[in-house]
Image (cartoon, grey):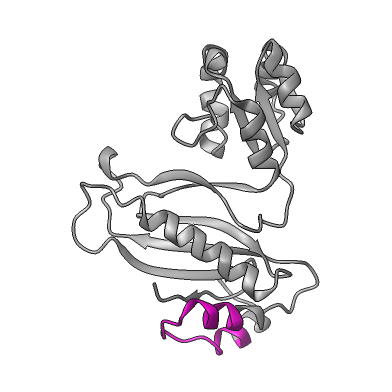
């Protein structure tokens, strides 16, 4: 069993099983900002889907209204004019065979990987390395694209990828504790609305079973839809 700190247990006493309106939940979460570092805020939604069914998976990406409080490190697989476009848009590394070799040799110091469609033959074999870390370029997530300039700019601005896990929970980073309450509310609402709009046609019954927000070192707070 996980042993929580005295600080965590004291904060947990402030929470309950009560489901709160989003603004009140954020207000309570902000009172948990008692660490010396700027905690990351996460939103988790438990969905009524069958994760084993391919037609019920929920996966995508979103550019949050106020970013996530962190500049992402982005690498791009491209050639020709797309190399220049990616570099001008702020990519941290751009390449082809050289970049593939660097990643095969163990370099993974980045947060997002983007590839043009004509580079997937080169990127495909990297799936064993990138896939388990959630870094594999995917058309569904928008990271396989001919428009590298736009997508690089989106990720540098804090675009967030999400996908449901094996238990049907989907979550994403939605900001930092240093954000004011209004910005956190905007970001969380945008994420919730995005997930609500993606209900698979094959999913039956209640789609969203519960929503909670939490910071890196805080208890969760339940949120009403």
Identify which residue is drawn at 52% across, 74% down.
Answer: 220
In the rendered image, is residue 84 in sight?
yes
Please tell me which residue lies in front, 77 or 64.
64
Please tell me which residue lies in front, 141 or 85.
85
Q: Is residue 129 above or below residue 99?
A: below
Identify which residue is drawn at 72% across, 18% down.
Answer: 83
Whole-percent x and y of residue 81?
Answer: 70, 13
Q: Is residue 39 left or right of residue 129?
A: right
Q: Is residue 73 above or below residue 167?
A: above
In the rendered image, is residue 217 in sight?
no
Whole-percent x and y of residue 99?
Answer: 70, 19
| Quadrant (top left/top right/bottom left/bottom right) for the C terminus | bottom left
Question: Which residue range is magenta in the image?
Answer: 10-28
Q: Is residue 159 above or below residue 100?
A: below
Please tell me which residue lies in front, 181 or 18.
181
Q: Is residue 103 left or right of residue 58?
A: right
Q: Residue 11 is drawn in which quadrant?
A: bottom right
- Is residue 225 rendered magenta in the image? no
């Amino acid at each position: 069993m996980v042993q929580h700190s005295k600080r965590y247990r004291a904060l947990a006493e402030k929470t309950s099983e009560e489901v709160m309106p989003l603004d009140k939940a954020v207000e309570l979460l902000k009172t948990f900002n008692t660490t010396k570092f700027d905690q990351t805020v996460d939103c988790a939604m438990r969905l009524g889907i069958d994760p084993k069914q391919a037609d019920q998976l929920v996966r995508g990406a979103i550019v949050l209204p106020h970013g996530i409080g962190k500049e992402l490190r982005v690498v791009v697989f491209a050639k020709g004019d797309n190399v220049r476009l990616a570099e001008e848009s702020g990519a941290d590394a751009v390449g082809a065979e050289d970049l593939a070799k660097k990643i095969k040799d163990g370099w993974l110091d980045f947060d997002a990987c983007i590839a043009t469609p004509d580079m997937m033959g080169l990127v495909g074999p990297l799936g064993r390395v990138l896939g388990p870390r959630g870094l594999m370029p995917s058309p569904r997530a928008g990271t396989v694209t001919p428009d590298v300039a736009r997508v690089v700019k989106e990720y540098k601005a804090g675009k967030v990828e999400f996908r449901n896990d094996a238990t049907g929970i989907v979550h994403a980073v939605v900001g930092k504790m240093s954000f004011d309450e209004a910005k956190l509310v905007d970001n969380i609402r945008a994420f919730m609305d995005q997930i609500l709009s993606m209900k698979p046609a094959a999913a039956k019954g209640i789609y969203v079973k519960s929503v909670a927000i939490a910071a890196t070192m805080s208890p969760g707070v339940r949120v009403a839809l």
